[in-house]
Image (cartoon, coloured by chain):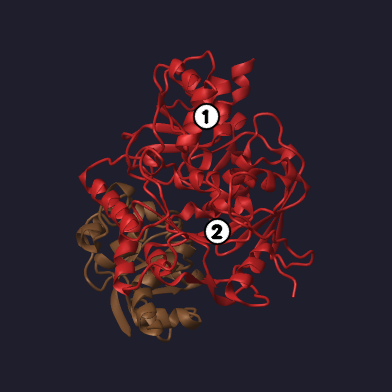
Chain colours: A brown, B red
Amino acid sequence: MILEGKTWKYGDNVDTDVIIPARHLTTADPKELAVHCMEDIDAAFAVNVQPGDIIVAERNFGCGSSREHAPLAIKGSGVTCVVADSFARIFYRNAINIGLPLLELGSDAKKIQAGDTLRVDLAKGIVENITRGEAFQAQPLPGFIQEIAQAGGLVSYVSGVRK
Amino acid sequence: MAMTMTEKILASHAGLESVQAGQLIKAKVDVVLGNDITSPPAIAEFNKIGRPVFDKDKIVLVPDHFIPNKDIKSAQMAKTLREFAHEHDITNYFEVGRMGIEHVLLPEEGLVVPGEVIIGADSHTCTYGAVGAFATGVGSTDMGAAMATGDTWFKVPSAIQVNITGSMPKYVCGKDVILTLIGMIGVDGARYQSLEFTGPGIANLSMTDRLTIANMAIECGAKNGIFPIDGVTIAYLNGRTKKTYQAVSADSDAIYTRKIDIDLSDLTPVVALPHLPENVKAVRELPEISIDQVVIGSCTNGRIEDLKQAAVIMSGKSVHPKVRTIIIPGSQAVYLEALEKGYISTFIKAGAVVSTPTCGPCLGGYMGILAAGEKAVTTTNRNFKGRMGHVDSEVYLTGPAVAAASAITGRICGPEEMVK
């Protein structure tokens, strides 16, 4: 699948408390969560994010709480993909499990700036920065994690594979 | 092939002779845990799969985050959890009045034992590494799927060996050990890895200290933190668990990607400054920092020994007039024991409030939310921006003795000031 969208850029250690603060965890509805997504570090995000936009961050994105509400809020906001230098492991699992694509880019993530337009080839793991004329290769998803992602998430995978 | 404790436990649960770091496996789980925030979405995913629960004795459900219900929506979430527990006849559902903060409650009830694979839809599930189990946090979908299938997938983590020697000086506690470690390696220093605690110093760490240390393994990104099974473990489990268990130990030639040495004798009381748990400083090196609130409790430091440390400091003293102090025993059993030992009386006489067990303030849920500009000293585990309230509030993480001393003086200070 090829995705194209504008970049929202964040730094190191964006934790799940700022992705979706606990005061909003009385719902698990992605649309309701999306209204408050990122509000403690970037009030403009929820207001201005467009369907198809892409989040790019640096090290350890999604650290902290295991709340699946964090990738749900991002998905609910219309973001199609998160690209980062690295991801915290529970966020990584959760995103795969709910069908939010992730690409781990290493230090190349630094070269992408807010507002850049990216074209992302998920199957090949290629991130092309159209604005700056650069392209980067991400690590492909390993083994059956790719199958979970392709099934659209863990529940579809479990239901399909094990019936 | 030589294996770490984590590798041995994962291999046995995957039905394999051996596993190695990086390998993707499917492993059987011994316990699947959820709370009132993470279980409702897990139940929704479970229902989509359309199968019965894999084992009603191996699912543990604990309403602890927003309970006693803080508002109508959280009441609805707790109700979802309760009805699911009743519908599926879940053996270990803990109702308000009989519950505790999950990671205080499960070890206390003997529900987690050495050699097990435990997943919980809560990041601090790694706490149970203290008793020699492989325990890790997952999300709601993982929990929902595992409630149906009884297994889950893992990437076998590579390991960091944390070699512990010496014994802790007075006023140093398990919290200082783990904060010091996080300060050394950073909040992603063990990302995707296991922290394998080894060395002669472990014999000098109580189960309370170990639970606190393993609890915060996630705060340096670790998948799990695990302690060897020794006399302290066995003594803790005796009379507490009905489960049988196998004492797993690491091979002497197991592979670690990194070795970190911590001499407990060198440690001093520390505080993690806002807004990351890695911003660790010795209490004695801090400038004067006036505070507005103190919270003593949580899955990190809500056990009886933690309350004892605080009570010893606060006995016969008064909380500073400008400070609100909230003390939260981690379970009903801890609460009762603290009552019987006189700690609760000490706290109330000192001018602190004592609450029923809840995660409330730690995650900015309720029961002690911070206003803009306020500073809190807490024995909890995260000091991220906005974690306990307003985005412009500040959280300072520390152990119970420093928190109690700070409550008295109204500024961050060490417990030795109290006994001068």
What residue lies at 42% left-to-right and 18% top-to-bottom?
Answer: B351
Chain letter belonging to callout 1: B
Give the label on residue B375, or none. Answer: none
Q: Which image quadrant is residue B170 in?
A: top right
Residue ID for mark 2: B135
Residue at point 32%, 63% (across, down): B43
Labels 2 and 1: the sequence-earlier one: 2
**Residue assigned mark 1:** B337
Give the residue type that dot 1 points to.
Glu
Marker count (numbered) = 2
- Callout 2 secondary element: strand
Q: Residues within 10 Å of mark 1 (few under 14, many from 20)?
A: some
Label 2 marks which chain's residue? B
Q: Is residue B136 left or right of residue B395?
A: right
Horizontal placement of B93 versus B263: left or right?
Answer: left
Is any part of residue B52 visible from this angle? Answer: yes
Task: Give B357 or B234, whichever is nearer the viewer.
Answer: B234
Residue A121 shows in this picture:
no
Q: Left or right of B76: which side holds B11?
A: right
Q: Give the camera-side residue of A157 and A68.
A: A157
Q: Is residue A157 above or below residue B131?
A: below
- x 70%, y 53%: residue: B229
Residue B59 screen position, x and y as percent? 44, 59
Image coordinates of residue B343 in percent, x first then y, are: 52, 23
Amino acid marked by disc 2: Ala
Q: Callout 1: helix, strand or loop? A: helix
Residue B18's spot in the image, x, y percent?
Answer: 67, 76
- The residue mark sitting in front, 2 or 1, is 1
Mark 2 vs mark 1, CA separation in Å: 27 Å
Q: Are marks 2 and 1 on the same chain?
A: yes
